[in-house]
Amino acid sequence: MHGKRWFLVAIPLVVALTVGGVALASGRSSRPTMGPWGRGVVHVQSSHGRAPKGSEVIVFVSKQTNDKFVDADGSGSQTVGDYDIFTETLLDEQSHQPVGIDNARCTLDFNGEMCEGLFTLTGRGDLSIQTQITNVVDLAITGGTGEFAGASGEAIGRPLQGGNTEWTVFIS
C-alpha cells in the first residue's frame, strides 16, 4: 500500500517538474497563466489601505466563477495586448453568502496589467473600478450607480489561498 501511494504522488510530481522545466528552458509557457487581478503575471502583494475620515467601509471576498484568457495576437504566449475577462461572486466576509458579482477585464501592457470593471452589490448599485496592477491590487473607484452614485475611493485587494481575494472597499 505504501509503495502504491508513493507511486501516485511521484508521477504527478515528475510530470509537473518536467513540464515546468520545459517551460523554463524555453523561456515561455505554451499555456497562458494570466488570471483575474494579475494572478500569474505579477507577484501580487497585500496593500494596507486606511479608511479616509467619513468613508463607508465594505469588506467582501471575491470567488472566481468564469474566466477567459484571450490571446489577442495568436502568438501562443502572453504578450502585450492579451487580456483576461472574468466574473466573480462577491461573498460576505463572515457569512460567506453572496452579496453581488464583479465583471472585469485585465489587459497585459508594458508595466503589468491594466484592469477595469464593476463591483455590483445586490440591491445597492454598481461601483466602477480601474487600476494598473504592478505588484499590489489597489483599485480606484471612479464612479457608481444607485446608492453609490458619484462615488469615489479605493478598493484594496488581499490575495487569499485558493485564488480568492479579500476586498476592503473605502467609499467617499
Image (cartoon, grey):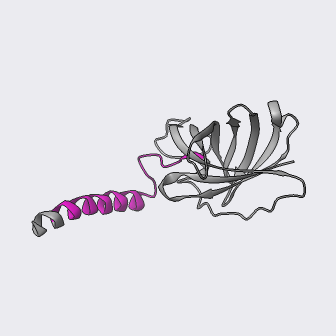
The answer to whether 117 is drawn above or below residue 26 in the figure is: above
- The residue shown at (9%, 65%) is 1
Q: Position of residue 15 (x, y in %)?
A: 27, 58
- The residue shown at (57%, 48%) is 95
The answer to whether 143 is drawn above or below residue 93 in the figure is: above
In the displayed orientation, state which residue is furthest to the bottom. 2
The answer to whether 53 is drawn above or below residue 71 in the figure is: below
Q: Position of residue 38 (x, y in %)?
A: 60, 51
Horizontal side of residue 62 vs 2, given as left or right: right
Horizontal side of residue 20 vs 41, given as left or right: left
State how many labels appear. 0
Front position in the image: 38 or 101: 101
**Residue 122 is at least partly visible in this image:** yes
Q: Position of residue 145 (x, y in %)?
A: 80, 31
Q: Quadrant of residue 3?
A: bottom left
Q: Position of residue 94 (x, y in %)?
A: 60, 52
Q: Is residue 11 shown in magenta?
A: yes
Horizontal side of residue 56 vs 88, given as left or right: right
- The residue shown at (76%, 38%) is 127
State the extent of the magenta-drawn residues as a range: 7-36
In the displayed orientation, state which residue is furthest to the front. 95
Front position in the image: 86 or 30: 86
Front position in the image: 81 or 51: 51
Q: Quadrant of residue 149?
A: top right
Front position in the image: 142 or 167: 167
Q: Main secondary structure of the magenta part?
A: helix
**Residue 144 is at least partly visible in this image:** no
Q: Is residue 123 shown in magenta?
A: no
- The residue shown at (41%, 61%) is 24
